[in-house]
Amino acid sequence: MFQMEAVCLNSDPVFDDCEEYEDEEDCSVEEHDDGVHEKDSKKESPQPTIGLEFGSFDEAYDFYNRYGKEQGFGIRVSNSWFRSKRKERYRAKLSCSSAGFKKKSGANHPRPETRTGCPAMLVIKLADSKRWRIVEVELQHNHPVSPEVRRFYKSHKKMILADKKQQESIPITEVHTIKLYRTSIDAACNGLQKIKDKDSRFPVDTSKHLELKEGDANALYNYFCRMKLTNPNFFYLLDLDDQGCLRNVFWADARSRAAFNYFSDAVAIDTTSLRNKYVLPLISFVGVNNHGQPVLLGCGFLGHESVEYFIWMFKSWHTSMLGRHPQVIVTDQSKPLQIAVSKVFPQARHCYCLSYIMQRVPEKLGGLDGYESIKMQLYKAVYDSLKITEFESSWGQMISQHGLKDNKWLQSLYEDREKWVPVYLKDISFMGIIPITENESLNAYFDGYVHKHTSFKEFVDKYDLAMQRKHMKEAMADMESRSLSFELKTNCNFEVKLSKIFTKEIFKKFQAEVEGIYSCFNTRQVNINGPIMTFVVKERVESEGSEVEVKLFEVLYETTQAEIRCICSLFNFKGYLCRHALNVLNYNGVEEIPSQYILPRWDKDYKRKFPVDSGLCHIDVNNPVELYNILHKHVMQVVEEGVQSEEHYKAVLQEVEALLSRFSLEDNNLVSL
């Protein structure tokens, strides 16, 4: 069931796409003095790049035409490829209007040659997704181009006329209204408060909305409509103020919603764009898959960094995941974020990302006298402390030695120390989602696709490409983990056992710990209390300047339940045992890693083996969204089995085709009745 929702998007008017294009013989330049839409020339279009996609050929043409107008050259369609039977264009080359040369004319007074054989062009191709993708680009011209020249090419003339026509017929203050669909999911969310209900304690500021520029509204509309038509499990919500202005947007595609089933134990809320004041106010929900790769669990656009807006975003995400919540949430150090997380996810452990905080050290402390010494002591306190007393002592020494008692940033960090300093977080299972060493960092999920000036339209155009590449990387990791045999570097049975279970990337990290056993020495028992034994393990550790330092690690080993815990707590931070714990097991003649320390989520077949609720008695058969989600979980298991071998693939394909044929036959019989 879908209910219609009228959504108003603030946007500059978007003129109609041109229906005709300059052909090979029509590329003359026209003088034009009219300064129509002068402000438009100040808006820089993104540079054409390989991989950029468009919803239609017209959109691609208009994109290059606007880019040409800003740079100072005209464009034309220099070549097109068509499928002969349907006369459908599937490939085209858009060139600078100075490309090639004119045919020689037999006239007595031929026009002078204006073309230069310019190589500037782009080639677009109709991709499998039915979107036009740039596959070749050449930006350099062999003639001068300048946007300052007061002349317009024919390809620009239609654009100007269209702008004029719309300026005359549409008031500047008009708000464009578009119709979008919102999935009706209230019944599936166990009575969750509706997203659009507002908390009276947080008054709405109607001036705080998403600032959509020309083309942004159309891009969002096209993307959401296309996804809803092609994917019933695509979810999105829009937040409007009383005037109908768009404040927040959230969406989660089918893959993100499926990934939440597997990898929702620890989630990072990525606010890199907000923290760095990007044009695009992007917020992403990110988990870690069984390869240790980041996986998207949903994303959105936030109109304002306030508690109310964060609450709306978190409730939208919570709703899209059918009321389930993560066990651990990692965010930037932000009070509005902290309040919103505590209200929407009170059961989750909320922590601050260590790398986000340490990245701000140069900005916050760089101007202080003795900065290098302060930084060194700060890093030592944060990264090297194995006990809380060690951290407190190192921090206090740094503060007193450099007179930092009144530094407000350091004061706030110390007050929140239990949310971000590793020594305070040893009882939490992070599954590798936070960095705990100086050389680790947490990169933004859309790093490389979003920069400071990325627009809404540009991001929506890039979103599918980014996700395709991420999914391809995960699929390749799945294939390598299942088909390749891993090179063993020791004779240790721990390594042999987990090489058959773990995915490639996680095994490589665990393998480094197995190799690290040989850097441990002088393991000795220092205490015994019933079945609990305490050991001290010495390890040679390279410190700054390649100097070797000996560090002591305490390891507790409970013999009856085969439970083991090291003071470094690597198992909780990363999800696999550390070299110190492995050393103690080896010291006690234990040849098999206890099963509780081999986490199923690192299994190369984790998604295939993931348990699916099969009870049908609680299913609402009148709720298509709930039916879709349950069927999707079961079908994903079939897909995972199908990719195991060619034999499995053929069997699954045969059964699926037989089932579809059966449904088609039943539908035809009903129609004939």
Image (spheres, helix red, strand yellow):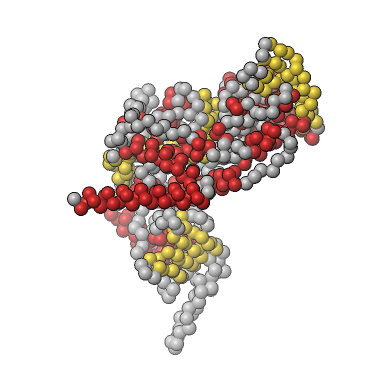
Q: Is residue 553 left or right of residue 191?
A: right
Q: Is residue 67 left or right of residue 229?
A: right
Identify which residue is drawn at 49% across, 35% down. 610
Residue that protrudes farthest toward the top in the picture: 529
Q: How many marks?
A: 0
Question: Where is residue 429 drawn, in percent x and y?
Answer: 57, 26
Q: Is residue 456 left or right of residue 543?
A: left
Q: Nearer the viewer, residue 144 or 214?
A: 214
Identify which residue is drawn at 58% across, 44% down. 482
Q: Quadrant of residue 291?
A: top right
Q: Quadrant of residue 316?
A: top left
Q: Nearer the viewer, residue 479 or 245?
A: 479
Question: Where is residue 594 drawn, in percent x and y?
Answer: 63, 26
Q: Is residue 53 left or right of residue 509?
A: left
Question: Where is residue 211 drawn, in percent x and y?
Answer: 41, 42
Q: Is residue 453 above or below residue 545?
A: below
Residue that protrudes farthest toward the left in the picture: 673
Q: Nearer the viewer, residue 63 or 297?
A: 297
Q: Is residue 673 visible?
A: yes
Question: Where is residue 442 drawn, in percent x and y?
Answer: 59, 36
Quarter of the N terminus within the rendering: top left
Identify which residue is drawn at 59% across, 33% down. 432
Q: Is residue 245 above or below residue 50?
A: above
Identify which residue is drawn at 22% across, 51% down. 671
Q: Is residue 550 visible?
A: no
Q: Quadrant of residue 7?
A: top left
